[in-house]
Image (cartoon, coloured by chain):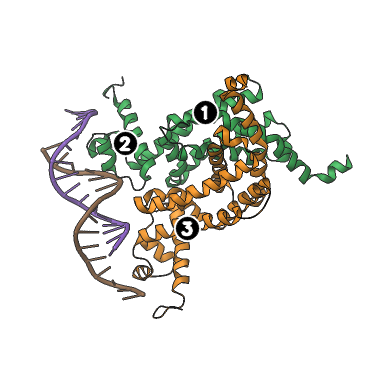
Chain colours: A green, B orange, C purple, D brown
Amino acid sequence: MARGRAADYDLTREAILARAAELFAQQGYPSTSMNQVAQACALSKPALYHYFRDKYAMLVNIAEGHVLQLHALVDATMALELEPKAKLSLLITRFVEAYADAQAAHRVLTEDTRFLQADDRERVLAHERRVVASFAQALVACHPELDETQLAKPLTMLLFGMINWMFTWLKPGGALNHEALAPIVVDLVLGGLPAVVRKHTSMTSPSSLQKA
Amino acid sequence: MARGRAADYDLTREAILARAAELFAQQGYPSTSMNQVAQACALSKPALYHYFRDKYAMLVNIAEGHVLQLHALVDATMALELEPKAKLSLLITRFVEAYADAQAAHRVLTEDTRFLQADDRERVLAHERRVVASFAQALVACHPELDETQLAKPLTMLLFGMINWMFTWLKPGGALNHEALAPIVVDLVLGGLPAVVRKHTSMTSPSSLQKA
DNA sequence: CCTACCGATCGGTAGG
DNA sequence: CCTACCGATCGGTAGG
């Protein structure tokens, strides 16, 4: 333990962030009061300020912590030696699982990033762009023609739409859960990719095909 | 024009709602002040209260107005006599266009509905459920096997994920726009559906297939 | 002197 | 329709 600092200082910090993330996710960052956070943590408000400089520091920690975790998970998965479809499948599965384990932080990241200052927001967005780039790379590996049609980016974003939207409609206790949905997303994307590439290619470059 | 009321009362109301929707979409409903709305409308704050009882009334009007419009658009499209794939395609295309024409109201509907009182929120959600049901019906018409596999609902929600998420990443002035994306979404879904149905059917009822 | 807090209240600003 | 305000509550911090 660090000198002069309680052994469970970091543990308490993490516990506070988890509670704050839940409240921010439910009510939004601006309309969540520090009194609510304090009450949810069974701490006094001054005690809260012992662990965080201000409310804004909590927002930065939640958003950046989550996106860092996602970035690390994606990098680790991309580093594996797997065939393209297996890698994309694993990427999606792990991503959905990470969302499931951090639903509150996920909603804060997608809805409250706009309340970050320009420099902090840019740092978070930089991580997000790296994650998106890896997904696009994994998609192109499955279907190399994607790269020529400039469809990799939009298809990646449609894929993110499916999984980012998932936890807005999944009922916690329902028969359908994220474990069951991940393979459905994989099959829908891998199954639909050929049709999209075929249609788009035939539409955009009919003359070049005629010349060849 | 109604007696005793200015001829452009309703027009002014709509103009105010449009400005308020933009501010709510940018900053969120709770952190948008009535002073900001008044300034954006070039009106005094008391003038604002001539058109709306309170800030909450604006939120209800924006959210309910938008979902009513979507519901009407879906009903009108479902009533057309078209072959299944053409109808689903038109449904998606019109829906994406409606979003494009009301991006602010769309974001308010998806992010600020949680700030509605229970009865108002329930009314909005009832319209959303009707819209979802129509999309599910249009999907099942394209691929009847969907109905047996209980995949219609989750696939419908994955489809909504793609189009609801679209305007969070589309750049207004970019090369890629919603007109180009709608057919890509259609092709991805129609192209991927068979693969999803095939995989899911073979996974869930192998024994029943063996018996038959 | 340090940390880890508590009860009480600060200056400003929100919706109305 | 404006200036001038209210009751309530915000994020943040004082002394002990």
Quick one: label 3, few (<14), some, or many (20+) residues within 10 Å? Answer: many
- Disc 2 marks a residue whose amino acid type is Phe
| Residue depth check, mark 1 versus mark 3: number of the one nearer the observer | 1
Distance from label 1 to label 3 (Cα)? 37 Å
Residue A79 seen in render: no
Q: Secondary structure at mark 1?
A: helix
Q: Which quarter of the image is occupied by the C terminus of chain A? A: top right
Q: Secondary structure at mark 3?
A: helix
Instruction: Please tell me which residue is depicted at 52% across the width and 46% down the height of the picture.
Output: B132
Say whether residue C16 is left or right of residue A25.
left
- Disc 1 marks a residue whose amino acid type is Ala
- Disc 3 marks a residue whose amino acid type is Glu
Say whether residue A59 is left or right of residue B181.
left
Say whether residue A61 is left or right of residue A67.
left
Instruction: Pick whichever of labels 1 and 2 is earlier in the sequence.
Output: 2
Instruction: Please tell me which residue is depicted at 34% across the width and 29% down the height of the picture.
Output: A14
Q: Does B82 appear above or below C16?
A: above
Residue that badge 2 annotates: A52
Q: Which quarter of the image is occupied by the N terminus of chain A? A: top left
Is circle 1 on the same chain as circle 2? yes
Residue that badge 1 annotates: A180
